[in-house]
Amino acid sequence: MGGADARIVRNTVLLILALVALRLVAAAFTPITFDEAYYWMWSNNLAGGYYDHPPMVAYVIRAGTMIAGDTELGVRLVSILLALPMSYAIYRSAAILFGGARVAATGAVLLNVTMMASVGTLIVTPDAPLLVASSFVLFFLAKVLETGRGVWWLAVGAAVGAALLSKYTAMFFGAGILIWLACVPKLRRWFLSPWPYLGGLVALALFSPVILWNADHQWVSFAKQLGRAKIEDFRPVFIAELIPTQIAFATPLVFILGAMGLHALTWRRAGALGSRVLIEAMFWTIVAYFVWHSLHARVEANWFAPVYPPFVIAAAAAANLVQWKPRQRRLADFCLRWAAPVGIVMFAALIVQANTGWLSGYRRDATVRSVGVGWRELAAEIEAVRARHGATCVLAQDYGTTGWLAFYLPRGTCVVQQNQRIRWVNMGEPDPKLLAGKLLYVDELRPDGHPVLNDLFAKVTQVAQLQRKRGPLVVETYSVDLLEEAKGDVLDRSPPPEAR
């Protein structure tokens, strides 16, 4: 490695370490989201699967809390640190596919400054480990292309298996790999080799705990997630959301570079055939599904996580390899120069806004309900009400409130979601003695109250109205009801629609 390349690598490593450190600081003081609190409850009850997703997010959280405790930082620690091996995988993938330390470093940096990576590894969801696993799927496929050695297919299978343990979206990697092999003549020999099929067995073996869990639970998780893929109502309005949300999640300048790179790979034949087709197959296969999905339902921006590794490598190729016309060259140079500063500023602004509301003048925004600002103070008030009335358990109506209550109330407090019991099947049933006495019911204040409670309890008394606030903004007002003299089973054990 020459002196110039060594400087590029050193500066890239230092920048990525600084970005990871920035996320760790933000993680320590940003309250967890309701999804993170929910997944944290999973991590306390590890299993082969869960109602909503495969179990990898629970494993990641459990590893972090074993190091840093049941804190905001503990929940997020390992997810954020996984950005380091993810960056290595992107660096090596870009170096193999398109050559040179500059392209490789650009790809690694561009991924880290996207909101998909910076916020997506800070806010722990199944998409965080999926993004990391997707980077290694691409890296190991690049090694297959580079070396021609079949043993790398075992590594591909391991990476795909890890991705499947993260989220069911990873099943589309299989289609992308098949398209890649079919479209590159020199790679078609792998169809007659045992190695890709052995890799598939490795992926299946890693994914088998999820299959077994579903088999024991009426295939409920498969039914829930795979059931999304049917068009019942044609509503193409959701397509209009795809590009704006991805511009935000990629950050505008990285998005422009990525679009330029995909154009160059397709129409200007930038790079070798095997490299070009690999990037396009791993990108467009999943994008095509989400476009189809958006014909009937909203596609959340973070669902695109697995296409970001090929996308940023295409962006790096656009910035460093393609011979553009002068105007396009100036655009590519501008985007490359300012992509990192813009991404860092966007990340910092989002963290400040989510925690304080300053940037919107304390008005509501998209983060205000999902990030648990004010929940520590609210939980202290709820605990005071619980202790004053001698309630033995706290009930909630939705998984988000249940997760927040469990995370912010004193450890060991009985917290139970009254309905949707399938979500908690891995936790076992709460102690009947705790449900036999006085209970608290916490839910958003509703104009018509909670009439269902009158069917379950002889006595329902509102004992408090409490507010969750971000600065002067009241985010939500909660009704706290004291429930006494249960008429029967307190919990609604109706099976979910998928199991009926």
Image (cartoon, rainbow, N blue to C red):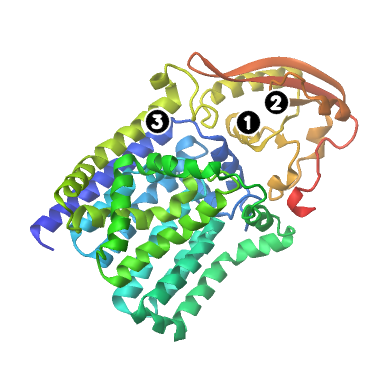
Q: Position of residue 36 (x, y in %)?
A: 54, 40
* Kind of residue indicated by mark 2: Val
Q: Tell me: 213 left or right of 197.
A: right
* Kind of residue indicated by mark 1: Leu
Residue found 45% across the figure and 65% down from its top: 159
- Residue hosting label 1: 405
Nearest the eye: 358 or 433: 358
- Residue hosting label 2: 442
As measured in the structure, the alpha-carbon distance from the residue carrying label 2 to the one carrying label 3 is: 28 Å
Name the secondary structure under disc 1: helix
As measured in the structure, the alpha-carbon distance from the residue carrying label 3 to the one carrying label 1 is: 23 Å
**Which callout, 2 or 3, points to the residue nearer the camera?**
3
* The image quarter in which residue 433 lies: top right
Q: Is residue 158 above or below residue 47?
A: below
As measured in the structure, the alpha-carbon distance from the residue carrying label 1 to the one carrying label 2 is: 9 Å
The N terminus lies in which quarter of the figure? bottom left
Furthest-bottom residue in this view: 192
Query: Residue 429, can we see it?
Result: yes
Name the secondary structure under disc 3: helix
Nearest the eye: 313 or 404: 313
Q: Are marks 3 and 1 in contact (CB under 8 Å)?
A: no
Nearest the eye: 16 or 314: 314
**Which callout, 1 or 2, points to the residue nearer the camera?**
2
| Label number found at residue 351 | 3
* Kind of residue indicated by mark 3: Ile
* The image quarter in which residue 391 lies: top right
